[in-house]
Amino acid sequence: MINRRKFIENSGALALGALAFGPQAAGKSVFGAVAPSMPIGLQLYTVTKNMETDPEGTLKRIAEIGYKELESASTKLGGYYGSTAKEFAAKAKGFGLSWKAHHITGGPSRITAGANPPAGPPSKNLRDNYQEVVNAVAEAGVSYLVCSSTPIETLDEIKQSIEVFNKTGEACKKAGIGFAFHNHWKEFERVEGKVPYEMFLSEVSGDLMKFELDLGWATKSGTDPLELFKKHPGRFPLWHVKDLDRVTQKPVEIGAGYVDLKRIFDAAKSAGLEHSFVEQDNAPQPLENIANSFKNLSALIK
């Protein structure tokens, strides 16, 4: 693995939910490979509560800020913010937004003994529902289905996740869409002597699964994104653009933390970047935070 101390020194150096099993812009800019007009996207997890209470009003505000692309996530409303996939795609399009990717977990959520299940309809997951979800998002015109997280507490869980990835990747390939895996930081930590992220890279074919690199969580783990791009060029078409507070290691607005985003965007071509989505987990003022992040990221990549 990449040396954690070395990377943190060079770069200047929330919790992952528990789970259980039971196409690139051309041109040049200041960061090398992405055209100045490359649209900035938003991961809607950042504005979950807003989307649950006022989906249309929230989409309208996202478009007004200047975002052009969306990545969706599950909510207590069920479906796609209370709509079918095709309905949600139409709503987004009505505000000038393009729905590019959808997040879904690799396995069902692990419910703590005695705890109440989450509110709303049961959440879908790849282990149990991959074909249904692939069919829905493909029909809606989504470009990528993304595994947001997957069980990795044991080597057996990691191997089962790889089986699910291969099945899902095959289904996505047949449907004409891409499949990708999104990281947190724990995938870079050893489990029974193995590093889950390295296993995913080596044991799932590149034509079946790409990667959505969360720049913030990768940095938190001590992993250098540029080293990943160098070893696996073109396999990271999706990014979560995330900044972190140096002390708390929690997400903050783009430009307010220590993640060296300029350095990473300079390597966009080697990554194979197609779509980038701003994400700030547990944002205190979501609509204000995403507006500031859009402004700061736009200045970085203009």
Image (tube, rainbow, N blue to C red):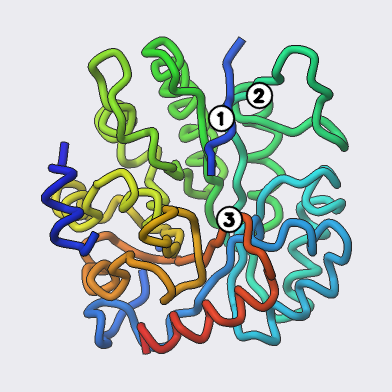
The percent position of residue 32, horizontal first and vertical second, equals 22, 79
Element carrying mark 2:
loop
User: What whole-number distance in Å separates the C-alpha atoms at marks 2 and 1?
Assistant: 7 Å
The numbered disc on residue 106 is: 1
* Residue in the picture at 63% in, 56% down: 282
Element carrying mark 3:
loop
Q: Judge whether 172 appears above or below 39 on screen.
A: above
Residue wearing tag 2:
108
Residues 164 and 187: in front is 187
Q: Residues within 10 Å of mark 2 (few under 14, many from 20)?
A: many
Query: Residue at the front extreme?
Result: 247
The percent position of residue 188, horizontal first and vertical second, equals 31, 35
Front disc: 1 or 3: 3
Q: Please say if the residues under marks 2 and 1 sit with CB atoms less than 8 Å apart.
A: no
The percent position of residue 103, horizontal first and vertical second, equals 60, 46
Q: Amino acid at mark 2?
A: Pro
